[in-house]
Amino acid sequence: MKRIPEPELMLDEDQVRAYAEADFDAPHSHFMELLLARCNDLPQTGRALDLGCGSGDISRRFAAQFPGWRIDSIDGSATMLAAAREMTPDETQIQYIEAYLPAQLTGQYDMIFSNSLLHHLDDPTVIWSTISDGVSPGCRVFVMDLLRPPDRETAEVFVTQYSGDEPAVLQNDFLHSLLAAYEEAEIVEQLRSAGLPLCVEVVSDRHIIAWGDFD
């Protein structure tokens, strides 16, 4: 199935509110489990970068797991970042930054992670170039995203199966995100072109990860 791009930024306040209030505990818990398994032995302190942080749930989960780390959380949507700040009572550990990729980073990082950003990007090179610019020696990288189904019918089955109880706006968003996602071979080629030595692994019927470290 040919990829069908979707809008890169979530700006509508009703759409953002529905997303921020949705129950993503299962997929976000899975994200953290996979990150901890693939990027084990992280030190007690460090500096992390969350690319496409959305309403900040993954950033907050990482902060709770690693209280000694500081996290820069980047998103291009001011509306989404406003929701993230509302849901983060203490921002001493997390700094939310409005930026559009490729971002001008303020330094290098010990951990770079991203959840469900890649499929929003019409030009996927911007996430990989930002990662290349942000890594420090020993940096761990973990990127998770949706995997494009073979056809629209399968995508519609996934919507019913995994978001059938969600509001219609979220079901519609999920469908279009699946249609906009990249295939495994496309991601492998993106990484090859970017010169990033990351492993690519399909981890569910609808999720794929790219991960590794930089010596």
Image (cartoon, rainbow, N blue to C red):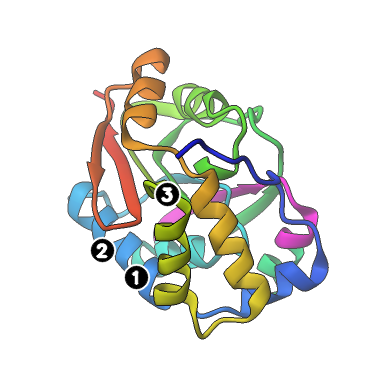
The earlier-in-sequence mark between 3 and 1 is: 1
Q: Earlier in the sequence, mark 3 or mark 2?
A: 2
For mark 2, give the secondary structure: helix
Establish if 207 lies above or below 99: below
Q: Is residue 210 left or right of residue 7?
A: left
Q: Position of residue 90 (x, y in %)?
A: 61, 72
**Which element carries disc 3, helix, strand or loop?**
loop
Extreme residue toward the bottom, this view: 165
Task: Say which residue label 1 marks.
Answer: 29
Q: Amino acid at mark 1?
A: Ser
Residue range (magenta): 68-81
The answer to if 79 sits in the magenta stretch is: yes
Which residue lies at the image location 26% right of the left edge and 36% below the top edge?
200
Name the amino acid, label 3. Answer: Asp
Residue that badge 2 annotates: 33
Give the image quarter of residue 37: bottom left
Q: Is residue 155 above or below residue 18?
A: above
Alpha-carbon distance for marks 1 and 2? 6 Å
Q: Give the residue displayed 47% in from the left and 27% down from the top.
A: 128
Examine the rendered structure and indicate whether residue 138 appears above or below residue 146: above
Q: Residues within 10 Å of mark 2 (few under 14, many from 20)?
A: few
Q: Position of residue 182 (x, y in %)?
A: 44, 38
At label 2, the amino acid type is Glu
Closer-to-camera residue (55/110): 55
Would you name the residue on which mark 3 appears?
151
